[in-house]
């Protein structure tokens, strides 16, 4: 089976993790701040907070921005459920904005129309989570301009996008958002096994997220309500969580970061080759905006079903039967049973639903060989036209 994604672990990665196992610190040591500084310096952000998952990063990002009961979080329906669930964790209400039919990202024009209606109804969002699907950044300049006009905060869910660029600058630099979140799950561009990171240029937000990721506890006398009782002293000054990243994970992340640019470049080479190999097949290939340099976590095609004479499911099943580990990213969140209990229904976001009816994620990972890619394309050709 050729998987849709997989990690690349080198001897240098293994040595980095073994070095931590032989050290004095398995958690709360020097590797986590080193990893944070490495990522922050690479993307051009002032502050970075490593945590145990991107979901945790989204949660503390929302809390740091003051999201709570009575507030609204808006995001795209084409994302993993965590991009929406983070609002529910805070007691807020969640709504969605339909996607751009070319990029599959949250559509700025649809967002503006929804904002006009929400302002009239008195229910503007407090936070908008812009998801960089497949690694391609959203139109962040347009979303930021709307944020300035309508007063909402912006989180970039860049779980797919580390190493990508928008308008020539690395995603994560915070020019158009309050907080950016990266994921380091094994199928992502670099991995820490599990793990995530929140980046911001706002010191106050960074301090708040640092507090929230570690039980709301501080040892900083300047943050305490009274002077410490002694060198052992700490205070809980907020309700936080245990969202810390381990030293082993961080050491792996530092080692992987050395290859980030090469990984993304390799993914671009594979994508260009896919584009050429699929040119004569009845599929829509990914469209890349000229302002963006995608992280290319995923390579998603859309089936031109009117030309194929087979169903979406038949093509998907055929590929799996031929040993091609295709997947589908993602099922529209508003169609999930949990969200339908809130009143969402099929038909609410038609572009997202059209995407879901046609999309297939082909294998894409940095160690993929051209021979493996040829097998994928041959299998797809058989699945489509026999």
Image: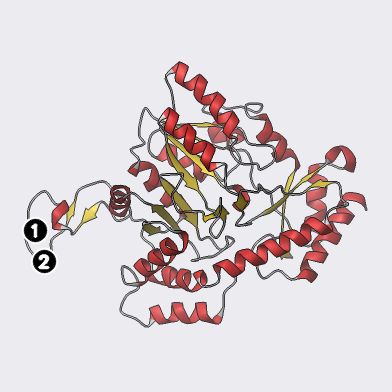
- In percent of width and height, residue 218 lies at 21, 56
Query: In the image, is residue 233 above or below residue 342?
Result: below
Task: Count every numbered label the image shows and give the total.
Answer: 2
Image mark for residue 231: 2
Q: Nearer the viewer, residue 338 or 46?
A: 46
Q: Residue furthest right?
A: 386
Whether residue 43 can be seen here: yes
Say how the picture is coloured.
secondary structure
Q: Residue at x 82, y 49 (%)?
A: 315
Q: Residue at x 25, y 51 (%)?
A: 216
Q: In the shown orientation, is residue 284 left or right of residue 89?
A: right
Q: In the shown orientation, is residue 362 left or right of residue 8?
A: right
- In percent of width and height, residue 153 lies at 41, 37
Q: In the shown orientation, is residue 225 left or right of residue 363?
A: left
Query: In the image, is residue 292 above or below residue 195?
Result: above
**Could you say whether the residue bearing mark 2 is in a helix, strand or loop?**
loop
Q: Quadrant of the N terminus?
A: bottom right
Query: In the image, is residue 273 above or below residue 350?
Result: below
- In percent of width and height, residue 67 lies at 36, 36
Task: Determine crowd level at label 2: few under 14, some 14-19, many 20+ residues with C-alpha closer than 10 A.
Answer: few
Image mark for residue 116: none
**Could you say whether the residue bearing mark 1 is in a helix, strand or loop?**
loop
Whether residue 365 can be seen here: no
Circles 2 and 1, Cβ within 8 Å, touching? The answer is: yes
Q: Nearer the viewer, residue 70 or 256?
A: 256
Picture quadrant where residue 11 is located: bottom right
Q: Nearer the viewer, residue 291 or 61?
A: 291
Residue position marked by numbered label 1 in the rendering: 228
- In percent of width and height, residue 113 lies at 56, 24
């Amino acid at each position: 089976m050729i998987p849709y994604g997989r990690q690349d672990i080198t001897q240098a990665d293994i040595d980095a993790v073994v070095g931590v196992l032989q050290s004095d610190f398995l958690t709360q040591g020097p590797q986590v701040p080193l990893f944070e500084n490495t990522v922050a310096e690479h993307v051009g952000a002032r502050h970075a907070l490593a945590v145990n998952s991107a979901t945790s990063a989204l949660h503390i990002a929302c809390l740091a921005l003051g999201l709570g009961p009575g507030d609204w979080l808006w995001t795209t329906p084409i994302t993993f459920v965590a991009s929406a669930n983070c609002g529910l964790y805070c007691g807020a209400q969640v709504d969605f904005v339909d996607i751009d039919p070319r990029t599959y990202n949250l559509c700025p024009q649809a967002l503006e129309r929804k904002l006009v209606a929400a302002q009239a109804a008195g229910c503007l969002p407090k936070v908008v989570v812009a998801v960089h699907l497949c690694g391609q950044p959203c139109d962040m300049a347009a979303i930021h301009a709307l944020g300035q006009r309508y007063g909402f905060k912006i989180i970039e869910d860049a779980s797919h996008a580390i190493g990508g660029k928008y308008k020539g600058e690395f995603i994560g630099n915070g020019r158009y958002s309050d907080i950016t979140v990266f994921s380091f799950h094994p199928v992502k561009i670099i991995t820490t096994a599990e793990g995530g990171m929140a980046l911001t240029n706002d010191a106050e937000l960074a301090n708040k997220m640092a507090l929230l990721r570690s039980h709301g506890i501080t040892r900083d006398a300047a943050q305490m309500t009274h002077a410490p009782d002694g060198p052992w002293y700490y205070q809980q000054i907020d309700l936080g969580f245990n969202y810390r990243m381990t030293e082993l994970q961080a050491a792996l992340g530092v080692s992987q970061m050395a290859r980030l640019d090469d990984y993304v470049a390799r993914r671009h080479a594979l994508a260009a080759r896919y584009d050429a190999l699929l040119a004569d097949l009845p599929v829509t290939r990914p469209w890349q905006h000229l302002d963006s340099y995608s992280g290319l976590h995923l390579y998603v095609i859309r089936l031109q079903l009117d030309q194929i004479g087979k169903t979406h499911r038949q093509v998907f099943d055929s590929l799996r039967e031929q040993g091609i580990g295709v997947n589908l990213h993602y099922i529209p969140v508003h169609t999930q049973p949990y969200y339908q209990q809130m009143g969402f229904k099929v038909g609410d976001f038609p572009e997202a639903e059209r995407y879901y009816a046609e999309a297939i994620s082909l294998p894409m990972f940095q160690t993929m060989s051209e021979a493996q890619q040829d097998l994928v394309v041959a299998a797809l050709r058989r699945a489509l036209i026999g």
